[in-house]
Amino acid sequence: MKPLSSILKSLPPTKVIDSSIEFSKYIALDLSVTNQELVDLKPENSEDLESYISSFLERNNAEVAFGGYIEGRTLYQRSSIFKNESIPERNIHIGLDLWTKVGTPVLAPLDGKVHSFKNNIGLGDYGPTIILQHEVENEKFYTLYGHLSLESIENLSVGTFFNKGEKIGTLGNSTVNGDYAPHVHFQIIQNIESYSGDYPGVCNTNDLNFYIENCPDPNLLLKIT
C-alpha cells in the first residue's frame, strides 16, 4: 500500500478556502521564533496579531497568508492549554494556517463525510472545529478545520457528505475561535485514534517525529507552492 504522503502528492492541487482567491494572492507567513519583527512586536492578543497580519498582507498585495507546518512558535505561551506545571510545553505547530478575512468560506478539499465536530472552547483552543473523513486509493484519513464560526457547526450532523469544493463553514472571529486573528487551522491526520471533534494541533519537541508521521504536510495536498 502506498504511503499517505505519496497519495497526497499524486492528487491535483485543491483549496480549503474561497476558491475565487488565486494562489498568486497567497503569501508565506513566518510566525516562528526566528521572525524578529514579530519578536519585537510581542503580540499579546488577537487584535495585535490581526493588525500585524493585515499589515503584512497589505504590504505584499496579498489576500491570504499561509504557513506554520512544523513551526516553533512563542504565541502559545499565553495559554495554559500549551504550557502549565503538569505537562511539557507544546509549541510546535503541526497543521497549516491560512490567515484571511473573517467569514471567508472554508471548503472541502476532497470528497468526504463529517467524522465529528465540536466547539473547543478556551483561550488558545480551536473554537468550532470540523473533522472530515476521506478515502483515496483505499487509504482512509482525516482532515481537521479549526477556528471556524459558530454557524459552521450549528446544523451539522455526523455522516454529512461534502463534495470536493463544497463549503463546509466559514472563518470565525476572535470571540469564538480561541482568541486568534481570523484563520483556519488545516491539518491532515492519518490515524485519529479515539479523538472526536478535536486532535492536537501543537506538539512538544519529544513527540514531533510521531506527529510528522501521522500528520503529513498539508501542502502536499494543497500545492500552494
Image: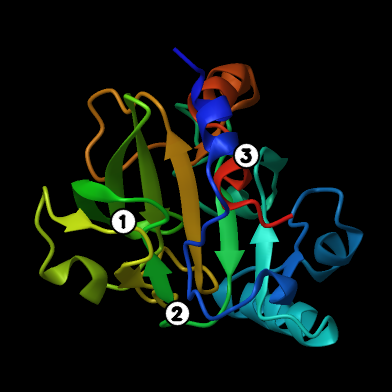
- Dot 2 lies on which element? loop
Q: Quadrant of the C terminus?
A: bottom right
Residue at 26 percent across and 32 percent down: it is 195
Badge 2 is on which residue? Answer: 104
Give the amino acid at mark 2.
Answer: Thr
Q: With 13 as the anchor, is 67 left or right in this view?
A: right
Give the amino acid at mark 3.
Answer: Asn
Q: With 223 as the anchor, is 225 left or right in this view?
A: right
Q: CA distance from mark 1 to mark 2?
A: 15 Å
Circle 2 packing at 10 Å, graded few (<14), some (14-19), many (20+), is some
Front label number (1 vs 2): 2
Q: Counting residues from the N terminus, which is met first, the one under dot 1 or under dot 3?
A: 3
The image quarter in which residue 63 lies = bottom right
In the rendering, at what x and y percent does residue 215 appear? Answer: 51, 31
Q: Counting residues from the N terminus, which is met first, the one under dot 2 or under dot 3?
A: 3
The image quarter in which residue 218 lies = top right
Q: Counting residues from the N terminus, which is met first, the one under dot 1 or under dot 2?
A: 2
Task: Work out whether residue 142 or residue 45 is closer to the camera in this orientation and state it.
Answer: 142
Residue at 38 percent across and 76 percent down: it is 175
Badge 3 is on which residue? Answer: 91
> Is residue 171 in view from this perspective?
no
Q: In the picture shown, does residue 144 fall above or below 207?
A: below
Q: CA distance from mark 1 to mark 3?
A: 20 Å
